Amino acid sequence: MKFSYTWLKEYIPSLPPPKKVAELLLMYSFEVESVEKKGRDTVFSIDILPNRIADASGHRGVAGELSAILQKPCKVPKRSFKEAAESTTAFVHIDVRDTQGCPRYAARMLKDVHVAEAPAWLQERLGACGIKSINNVVDVANYVMLDMVQPLHVFDADKIGGGIIVRRAVSGEKFVSLDGETYTLDSRDLVIADNKGPLALAGIKGGKCAEVNEETKNIIIESANFDPESIERTAKKVNLLTDAAVRFRVGIDPNLTVLAINEAASLIQEIAGGRLLRGIVDTGKNTPARTIGIHKEKANSVLGISLSEKEMVAIFKRLGFGVTRQKEYIQVRIPSIRVDLQGEEDLIEELARMYGFFNIKPVAPRITFMEVGDTRREKFRERVRERVAAFGYSEVYSYAFAGEREMSLYTGQAGVLSLLNPLRPDMKYLRANLIGSLLSALAKNQQQDAARVFEAGNVFSRPAKSIRDTTELEEERIAFGFFTKDLHESSYFELKGVVSSLFESFGIDDMYFDDADPGSSNLFHPFRSAQIKTDTQTIGIVGEVHPRVRDLFGIRGGVGIAELSFAKLFEAASAELRYQEISKYPSVMRDVALLVPMDTRVAEVEDIIENTGGELLADTDIIDIYEGAELPDGKKNFAFRLVFQSPDRTLKDEEVNAIVEKITKTLEETNEEWEVRG
């Protein structure tokens, strides 16, 4: 975002030179990407993080930061205006039909304004921030947004029929923007409308039909507060990330609506004349300030410093917070504009910022020796990842956060976990399964004819029973899935084959597929899905993704996904482990390839090999399962590695070869369709 040095200096007359200002902001608040001379002004390009857009995407917010850093007063001029006897309510009628999408809508009206070119100072301020001048009235709305954060819109009142309506669009409804572009809306898009149709795409872009131009005489100023998630979704859909949408999509202070509209009314009256009607039409009310308690001992412990209570109070007052000292803690009153401050940890971070991270001396951490965890589990995790990768799947790493789209796939009984301060509206939850993450990854790889991906990671949910530790909210899972542009029924069965092969590779021979849980019917194809079970427990689910879910993620093709509980898979594999003393004599290896029908199971062959091999056969591993065009129809090839070892002597090639010959003969005699090769 761009900020004018001249504008900031108006609030802090003794502001240091631009280079020093950039250094201070970088050290205490924000990353300054560039400092550029522009005419008589200097422009800062500042990276305002999403959690600070609500207060610091306006010049007053940045000036407030500099005031706290420099410990110099920030002087904001007070504007006044003169109201006419006529009441706004007599001419402006607001009907908010979706209060969730629009919690607050305020409007003021001016009559007999003179719309013309904006004064030079106003054009310079907007130009420094990268905004083109339109006219004196529209420019004031943009100026107030750049100053106070709150986006505004101005309508030509004489072009509005029957009052202002805030509603969801009718599916297929058309909207023509100020720049003449036509957009097709759906029923989830929020619009500002009259009785003829949409006047504006709420919180994103104004419409052509009520545009303010040089012929305009009477205007209505809009100042509203919109649901961040709704703005985010629509802005992405229509590909319009305007300055207003950038602010509304993260959520801003609803108290700004009235403050900003009064500021705009005063400036318009000053620049364009006109009669300001008495009062405001306001559908909402102010949000009370929050109070948060902070304990001095905890703050110092977290930061590794020794701030006194007096120093903490001074820092909070510099930031414009109200402070009340209590017996055991400091009670801090947070201005409503600081929507990012929600708990004690946030206040501790504010102390660190204003104290200066560079003033916190590095201290070598105390080393605590801890008992090594379960290395068997760690090694098993790596083996699972390696084997899924060997099946042709590429590993992906996704955020552990999810939005409404991903969470709509969750069918469990445990409660979902939402974040108090999400980075973005589409990251407001902790994911409850890996399926949504894989679908997002596959959706991004549709340029390929086919894609196979897997992920191993944690999912989160709140169990019905009380918990003793936050680790009880986590569960480790592994999921793998495919995308193909040409879906055929065998794709699902191929995925089941991968699941079977994975279990067989760990010697789990009691795995079977059972009818899918009815609760998964909204996620998977009703006839191509199954639960993955052993004799003792349900380990996961596999299925072809339902067309409705594919459409939700914008996937044009077939998708199949399997998701397994890692803990249950580890338990099932561990049950197959046998322990014996390690032989000091060398082992001998032989490989056996076997051509078998497609429905032959690895475990079936392994049983015969192990029963025939006798005591000298120490281990049997499946090292390859091959299915290719060069093999006979309906056939696949198993490759086994046999390890022979004696506990009391070194084996000779002759006796090993004799055992291998016995095994191969038994395999071919067991089933006439089995053929030992090579």
Image: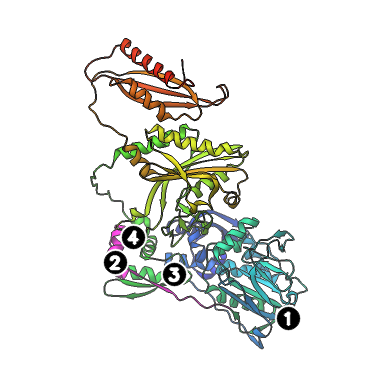
Would residue 612 be found to the left or right of residue 514 on screen? left
Mark sitting earlier along the chain (4/3): 3
Residue at 36%, 65% (x, y): give it.
Answer: 344
The amino acid type found where label 4 is placed reads Lys
Query: Mark 3 vs mark 2: which is more N-terminal?
Result: 3
- What residue sits right under mark 2 in the picture? 296
The disc labelled 2 sits on which kind of residue? Lys
**Which of the two discs, 3 and 1, sits closer to the camera?**
1
Q: Are marks 4 and 1 in contact (CB under 8 Å)?
A: no
Real-space Cα separation, disc 3 to disc 2, in angstroms: 26 Å
Please rate how many residues cluster around mark 2, counting C-alpha atoms within 10 Å: few if below 14, some from 14 to 19, many from 20.
some
For label 1, count other residues whose C-alpha is less than 10 Å away and answer few (under 14), some (14-19) or many (20+). some
Q: Nearer the viewer, residue 324 or 379?
A: 379
Of residues 638 and 588, the one drawn nearer to the viewer in this rendering: 638
Alpha-carbon neighbours of circle 3 within 10 Å: few (<14), some, or many (≥20)?
Answer: some
Q: Secondary structure at mark 4?
A: loop
Residue type (three-letter) at the residue carrying disc 3: Lys
Q: Earlier in the sequence, mark 1 or mark 2?
A: 1
Q: Is residue 497 positioned above or below 181 on the image? A: above
**Seen in the image, is 617 located left or right of residue 318?**
left
- Element type at marker 3? loop
Residue at which label 1 appears: 112
- Give coordinates of residue 125: x percent, y percent: 62, 65
Among the two numbered marks 3 and 1 on one chain, the one whose residue lies closer to the N terminus: 3
Residue indicated by mark 3: 72
Which residue, given by chain and number where applicable, does mark 4 sit on? 465
Q: CA distance from mark 1 to mark 2?
A: 58 Å
Kindly give the residue lying farthest to the top in the view shown. Answer: 654
Asked if residue 186 is positioned above or below residue 293 in the image, the reply reads above
Residue 307 part of the magenta segment: yes
Magenta highlight range: 283-311
